[in-house]
Amino acid sequence: MSRRDVITLAVLVGAIFVAYLPAMHGSFIWDDLSHVTRPDLRSLHGLWRIWFEVGATQQYYPLLHSAFWFEHRIFGDASAGYHVLNVLLHALVVCLLFFLLRLLKIPGAALAAAVFALHPVHAESVAWISEQKNTLSAVFYLLAMVAYLRFDDKRDRSSYGVASAFFVMALLTKTVTATLPAALLVILWWQRRRLSWRRDVAPLLPWFVLSAASGLLTAWVERRFIGAEGASFELTLLQRCLLAGRVVWFYLGKLIWPFDLMFIYPRWTVNPAVWWHYLFPVAAVLIVAAAWFMQRRWRGPLAASLFFIGTLFPALGFVNVFPFIFSFVADHFQYLASLGVIVAISAGFALLLERLPRKAQWSGRAFCCMILIGLGALTWTRSRTFSDPQTLYLTTINANPECWMCHNNLGILLSDDGKPWEAMQHFEATLQFKTDDAFAHNNLGNILFQVGQLSSAESHYEQALKSKPTALMHVNLGALMLSTGRLTEAIEHLEEAVRLKPQFIEARNRLGNALVLANRLSEAKEQYESILRLDPGHAQARSGLSDILARQQGSKD
């Protein structure tokens, strides 16, 4: 790598840090605390659970959650460290991309790396701590690609082993990297005009097997542990094809015109009876067909199209992923896929500049600088959105008023901030746009319980329980019944909560308290002892157990 290349990368890394400066001062948002290691996973046994207990973490990405495990040892609960690390990982991805494009001798490497570095569509992946899965997996993805291309050149086992190790690491960080072997075949075809079964396809067959296994496991985890099933995901094959076409054009549009970006976009209704819905997949097929006919002269457009659509495949709608319950599209879904479009356009512009007179070349470079400054400014503005949860939700609601998830989460924040009436308005807005949302019913029930409207609170708790019979819903309804003197019914709900979630300490504690009131002391004692096995320092359980032992001793005396 030349001195000029090193200077270019140093400038790019500096620009990245400037563009993401607002995010580095940000706090945790939305589900960040589901990724930053929970207290019960912070021990060595917790690290073992991350790897060998499916469901211990939100998604089975053990390498990602191991990284978070080590990060918590360093940063603790200080969000700034996680933000800075994610920006550093994005900068490393940009450096690896630049190196890869130089290796492939693709024109416009510096421009492509700069656009990828500063494009605001990537702000969600970089400014959001949870999306470290994107930046970290992209590092392993590009390292695997570089190592495999070296293997393709030298055909030595060590390079293949290194490439395979990086690929497995990428899969264990985020499953979208399963598209890598197909992406490599596209690159090899672009280089050689044809593919050889023995030289090109056969070495990647084990990778395809790993990709399929990883994809099936992730799809099962999404359904079993995260909830990617139900009415919101019931689409016919025709609907999924129509959706896929629209998704492709949406992401392409945001790359070319990166305005009106949102954390949660409006969720489309995919209706096969609406004629213009067919235009999206038809136009996508026509574009790919046109690129196919151009391949004898220019292979780049077809390679870019295949890479872009192929890498997007896990997010096109053929596989259920939980975020589809909110929207069928999200900026972070195209972090890797955007490489195909960005590299192709940058290479085309670089080739065009080479054919222009010298004065026109300077004008072209100035134009590129203006574009990059504009992209950096948009990214700086966009990264401010992720500075804290309230800013994120309010910004999203202003752009997408029907975002029921943001209304619900904002209501929780307002409730925690001691503003029950304002919180109630947002919970009611949530139910206006999603009438069967169990969590909104539950949260509204909590507010009504808090302000003393017990009858209305019970009604919402019952609707929450009907929509989603979770342990939490049973605990809340049980607590309300306990407060109104219906001890038997309260105990039934609390026992069901413990049955559904045996490690739910609050459920056991409330059940223990209710059993004491019912004078079922031996059963209450069992609950308090179970709590202390889970959390030896639990003060309420220890106090409750002491009271029971004192009462039992007093009765003996």
Image (cartoon, grey):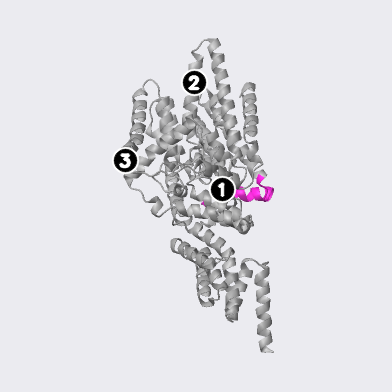
191 to 488, vertically: above or below: above
Instruction: Give whichever of discs 3 and 1 has the lower sequence position.
Output: 1
Instruction: Give whichever of discs 1 and 2 has the lower sequence position.
Output: 1
Which kind of residue does numbered mark 1 sit on? Answer: Leu
Closer to the camera, 41 or 237? 237
Residue 352 painted magenta: no
Instruction: Give whichever of discs 2 and 3 has the lower sequence position.
Output: 3
138 to 236, vertically: above or below: above
Q: Which residue is mark 1?
A: 63
What span is in magenta?
Answer: 57-79
The residue that appears at 41% across and 32% down in the rendered structure is 306
| Within-10-Å neighbours for mark 1: few <14, some 14–19, many 20+ | many
Closer to the camera, 121 or 210? 121
| Within-10-Å neighbours for mark 3: few <14, some 14–19, many 20+ | few
Residue 76 painted magenta: yes
Q: What secondary structure is found at the residue carrying circle 2?
A: helix
Q: Which residue is mark 2?
A: 349
How many numbered marks, from 0 up?
3
Closer to the camera, 44 or 332? 332
Which kind of residue does numbered mark 3 sit on? Answer: Val
Q: For residue 348, say whether it is visible.
A: yes
Q: Nearer the viewer, mark 3 or mark 1?
A: 3
Disc 1 and disc 2: Cα gap in Å? 38 Å
Q: Which residue is mark 3?
A: 274
Q: What secondary structure is found at the residue carrying circle 1?
A: helix
Q: Nearer the viewer, mark 2 or mark 3?
A: 3
Disc 3 and disc 1: Cα gap in Å? 44 Å
